[in-house]
Amino acid sequence: MSTVLPKNYIEQAESLLTTEIWPQQEVIYYTCFERVLNAFKRHKVGEEHFLSVTGYGHDDLGRETCDAVFADALQAEAALVRVQIVSGTHTLAIGLNGCLKPGDTMLSITGRPYDTLEEVIGLRGDSRHSLAAKGIRYNEISIFEPGPTEQPGLQVSVRENITPEEAEAIRQADLVFIQRSRGYSQRPSLTIAQLSALIGEAKRINPRIKVMVDNCYGEFTEAQEPPSVGADLIAGSLIKNPGGGIVPTGGYVAGCQDLVDACADYLTCPGVGAEGGYTFNLTRVLLQGLYLAPGVVKEALKGMTLAAKLFEDAGYETTPHWKDTRSDIIQILTLRDPEKQVKFCQILQSLSPINSHITPVPAKPPGYQDEVVMAGGTFIDGSTLELSADGPLRPPYAVYLQGGLTYAHARLVMRHILEALTN
């Protein structure tokens, strides 16, 4: 591509975004921040909650208060927030095992889940600890419809109607699983309004069904969270949105009290549940990260809308478009060239605060089927709330750009990348 960038192209894009998009994101930020602050006030958080209880961790007031504050902030009845959770995939595995028992059926209604869940479910590999090995059945449908054939993989949308065959699958299921974010696909992330409609329809068809939402990348991107529209359980990672860019590890589940209790039993063991576990003197950081999270998410969303606008102006395909409603912090930039895909990540890495001297190369990480190129010079290893990008080396050779603790960082990186790709 040989697009010539006009003079002051970033300032021109910012002028439009300042008028049309960013004010809406500010309103969401203020709404989410007020809810988080009210959660702190309601539970009377004080310095005494920053102290950890060693050993078994019994009667840890800070841990209990942290769970309660997160539950309120995420509009849930209860929450389990733990630094012992190692990743978003681990959190989702805990949630699925908490919701399902042998003989149950899990139905994903957003198609094939994110790559790293395939071994958890038993779609790949032969682990005796997968859901399939425990006698839990799996089925999937997709509520998305493809775009025009001349643009394969683009303009994917959510279908308005559930077919009779899909309704029967919902009736036969014990758990509906919804992946809110897009994963390594061209499908859109689901807005709260779409989640509300899907959850309502699923429960109309099957009133006994439980609904679990993979909330990774979605927290505080909209004014509401999935439990407020009927989700029975959500799960996410603390090195993504709710950690505010400062929490070093961990994850959460939140939702109905009985399901959160079941998840706690799976994380520790029956009889201990949420009542044990050392918090490693990290309660202050967990709470401070949550307090910062709405503001950091707003910064990330500003950076992603700028990236969408600039790359669309340069002639690239983007999902979502810069005007679209956003329900996660991910921006897909379709480059259709493996060399550009790798170059994009290498430039981003070179402009990162950490490990800027390292050059990313494609490799096959644990849990993935394809080689992936990843750029993430982050203060917290693997943190995707910090500005990072990755993508599997397979058509259409897209980069999945996400995060950004500050808008200034995203702005600078986009300028360098665009000028390198278009000159």
Image: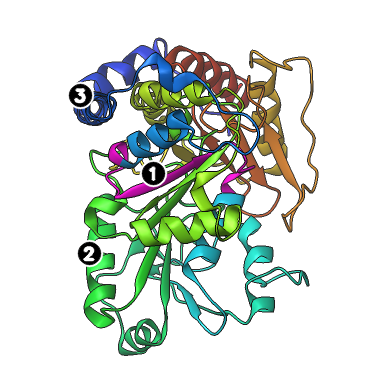
Give the secondary structure at mark 3: helix
Q: Position of residue 289 (x, y in %)?
A: 45, 24
**Disc 3 crowd, CA 10 A, few/some/many (<14, 14-19, 20+):** few
Which residue lies under the disc numbered 2? 197
Report the amino acid beneath label 1: Pro
Is residue 84 part of the magenta span, yes or no? yes
Q: What amino acid does circle 3 point to?
A: Pro
Residue 399 horizontal/vertical position (percent): 59, 40
Residue toward you, 109 or 252: 252
Q: Mark 1 and mark 3: span between their CA atoms?
A: 18 Å
- Residue 291 — which label? none
Looking at the rendered structure, the kind of residue marked 2 is: Ala
Q: Quadrant of the N terminus?
A: top right
Verify CB contact (< 8 Å) between mark 1 and mark 3. Answer: no
Cα–Cα span, label 2 and label 3 = 26 Å
Specify whether residue 180 is in view. no
Query: Of tags 1 and 3, which is closer to the observer?
Result: 3
Residue at x 78%, y 41% (from the top left corner): 362
Q: Which mark is residue 320?
A: 1
Which labelled disc corresponds to residue 23? 3
Per the rendered image, the range of residues in magenta is: 72-89
Work out whether 211 lies above or below 165: above
**Rendered position, 235 above or below 203:** above
Query: Could you tell me if residue 104 is visible in this image?
Result: yes
